[in-house]
Image (tube, rainbow, N blue to C red):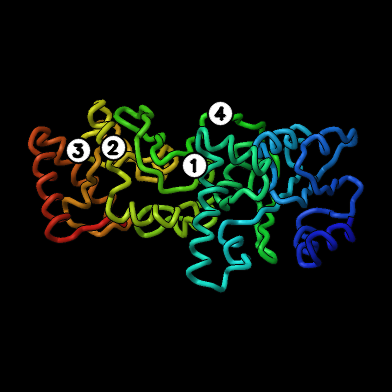
């Protein structure tokens, strides 16, 4: 097994993998395959499964992960490897010719990243490539793993290939409704603690929602109250967020009566658990809003300022339920237009 891994992945990869599992143990299965049947048809039982074939070349990624899941018990190790979009761009033979490099990679990105996720074009892509060399982000691969019942333990990039160490923790979710398009719904807490689907333009990679706990455990929160060093964000997503463009679809929620124009921002159930109890009690009494109080009050976007702004708004809303939103809305528009207030 040691020699196989060194020949296939190199000595550095072998040392990394050996740190996380007993590579040469008879209870470790080492394969290089894109076909799940090469794993599940093995009648032996294993504590660890290592696949040295890149996930980029697997036709049905989730199906592959789900079958591996069925071969393991909770606590067993599953190790995969893949090439990220950034790594592929850096290794490309045209990488040192600026204009040609960018044009060529743009074509590759559309064909190998966009086509596999678009109805109609998907069939063309898989007909021509059989699912090989797909462009994948780190967030998508890790998110798929978590959705299929694995917990991320560690990851490392070695010679352009990212290796991910996981452990099985539960059965797969079998999510058949993952969103790939530019518009999607996030599960957020509304009035009375009811979960609602809040519309947004996509700023993160697909399956990113499965990595919320992983990113928070890895990096914690930033001053703005959002996950710090969040690799789930796309480059264009940062731009959309800065100018609140990603939140324009929330007007759909306003029309549906789930949100207001002004109010505390709709947050995830996970984040709700991290805010003070008194603020939790105040929050669930009102609908969330599109424009948060810290913008209207022209405060900083760090956690402390945001929470204090929300507390002041909610207390005032209790006292003056009919005039508070109008006041905050006008103040927010003034701060955005004339003071150039921007999102964190």
Q: CA distance from mark 3 to mark 4?
A: 32 Å
Which residue position is annotated with label 1? 209
Which residue shows up at 49% across the image and 64% down it? 102
Which residue position is annotated with label 2? 250
- Which is nearer the N-term, disc 3 or disc 1? 1
- Which is nearer the N-term, disc 1 or disc 4? 4
Horizontal and vertical percent position of residue 271: 41, 43
Residue 193 relative to residue 181: left or right: left
- Which is nearer the N-term, disc 1 or disc 2? 1
Which residue shows up at 88% across the image and 59% down it? 2
Q: Which mark is residue 261?
A: 3
Horizontal and vertical percent position of residue 298: 18, 57
Labelled pair 1, 4 in contact (Cβ < 8 Å): no
Horizontal and vertical percent position of residue 248: 27, 42
Indicate whether 131 appears above or below 335. Answer: above
Indicate whether 21 appears above or below 123. Answer: below
Which residue shows up at 68% across the image and 46% down it? 132
- Which is nearer the N-term, disc 3 or disc 4? 4
Which residue position is annotated with label 4? 176
Could you tell me which secondary element the residue under label 4 belongs to? loop
């Amino acid at each position: 097994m040691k020699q196989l891994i060194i020949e296939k992945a190199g000595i550095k990869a072998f040392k990394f993998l050996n740190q996380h599992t007993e590579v040469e143990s008879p209870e470790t299965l080492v394969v290089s395959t894109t076909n799940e049947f090469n794993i599940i048809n093995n009648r032996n039982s294993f504590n660890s499964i290592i696949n040295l074939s890149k996930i980029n070349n697997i036709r049905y990624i989730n199906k592959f992960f789900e079958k591996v899941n069925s071969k393991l018990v909770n606590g067993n190790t599953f190790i995969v490897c893949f090439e990220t979009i950034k790594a592929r761009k850096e290794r490309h033979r045209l990488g040192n010719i600026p204009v040609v490099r960018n044009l060529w990679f743009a074509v590759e990105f559309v064909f190998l990243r966009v086509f596999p996720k678009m109805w109609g074009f998907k069939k063309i892509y898989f007909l021509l490539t059989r699912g090989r060399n797909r462009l994948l982000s780190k967030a998508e691969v890790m998110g798929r793993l978590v959705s299929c019942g694995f917990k991320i333990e560690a990851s490392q990039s070695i010679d352009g290939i990212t290796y991910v160490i996981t452990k099985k923790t539960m059965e797969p979710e079998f999510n058949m409704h993952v969103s790939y398009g530019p518009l999607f719904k996030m599960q957020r807490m509304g009035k009375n603690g009811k979960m609602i689907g809040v519309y947004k333009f996509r700023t993160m990679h697909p399956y990113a929602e499965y990595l919320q706990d992983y990113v928070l455990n890895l990096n914690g929160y930033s001053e703005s109250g959002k996950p710090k060093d969040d690799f789930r964000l796309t480059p264009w997503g940062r731009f959309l967020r800065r100018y609140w463009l990603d939140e324009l679809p929330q007007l759909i929620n306003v029309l549906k009566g789930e949100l207001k124009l002004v109010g505390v921002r709709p947050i995830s159930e996970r984040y709700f658990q991290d805010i003070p109890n008194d603020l939790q009690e105040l929050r669930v009494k009102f609908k969330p809003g599109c424009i948060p109080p810290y913008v209207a009050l022209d405060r900083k976007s760090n956690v402390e300022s945001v929470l204090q702004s929300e507390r002041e708004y909610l207390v005032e809303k209790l006292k003056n339920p009919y005039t508070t939103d109008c006041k905050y809305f006008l103040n927010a528009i003034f701060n955005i237009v004339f003071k150039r207030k921007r999102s964190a």
